[in-house]
Amino acid sequence: MPLWLLALIYFFLLSLVVSIWAALGNIAALASLIATTALLILIAFKSALVIEVDGHELRVGRARIALEYLGAVQSLTSAQLGALRTRDADPAAFLAIRFWSSTGVRVAVNDSRDTTPYWLITSNNSGKLAKALESN
């Protein structure tokens, strides 16, 4: 998650802390400040999209697919990704997107048992991800 988004979330949480301070005093405000800071750290770690490629499979978050079922890999620009996740989207596609990432990769799925046509994955390092998928 980008720093600007974390700062915005923290600002909203701090407004809650100020409200608690005004109503309940210093001790409650300190406790709520500690709790909101811990909550922000938890949000930052839980919102991370972990993408891993090894010799056998592609893992995106908790989803996984064997590399043998992957087809063409296309690195997407910001405009291409914007179109593919909105008006050109396929409802059956697997989407692993974060709105703060402007580039990504489209990976075709070649499995007759799977109705998912492709995986759309946002990544700030889409070129590296595409190369890793193509080399395996």
Image (cartoon, grey):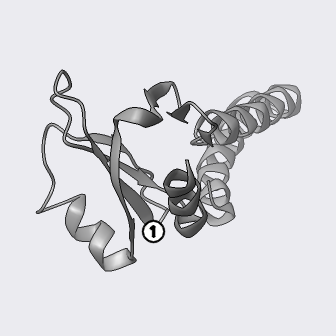
Numbered disc 1: secondary structure:
loop
Q: Is residue 33 left or right of residue 89?
A: right
Q: Residue 132: image x %, image y %? A: 59, 55
In this rendered view, identify the residue nearer to me: 39 or 17: 39
Q: Residue at x 67, y 59 (%)?
A: 7
Mark 1, other Cα within 10 Å: few <14 / some 14–19 / many ≥20: many
Q: Residue 31: image x %, image y %? A: 83, 26
Q: Residue 76: image x %, image y %? A: 37, 70
Q: Residue at x 67, y 50 (%)?
A: 10
Residue 27 versus residue 33 in the image, above or below? above
Q: Is residue 16 left or right of residue 74?
A: right
In this rendered view, identify the residue nearer to me: 1 or 64: 64
Residue 109 versus residue 12 in the image, above or below? above
Residue 113 versus residue 92 in the image, above or below? above
Q: Residue 85: image x %, image y %? A: 24, 58
Q: Which residue is mark 1?
A: 103
Identify the amino acid type marked 1: Thr
| Label tally | 1
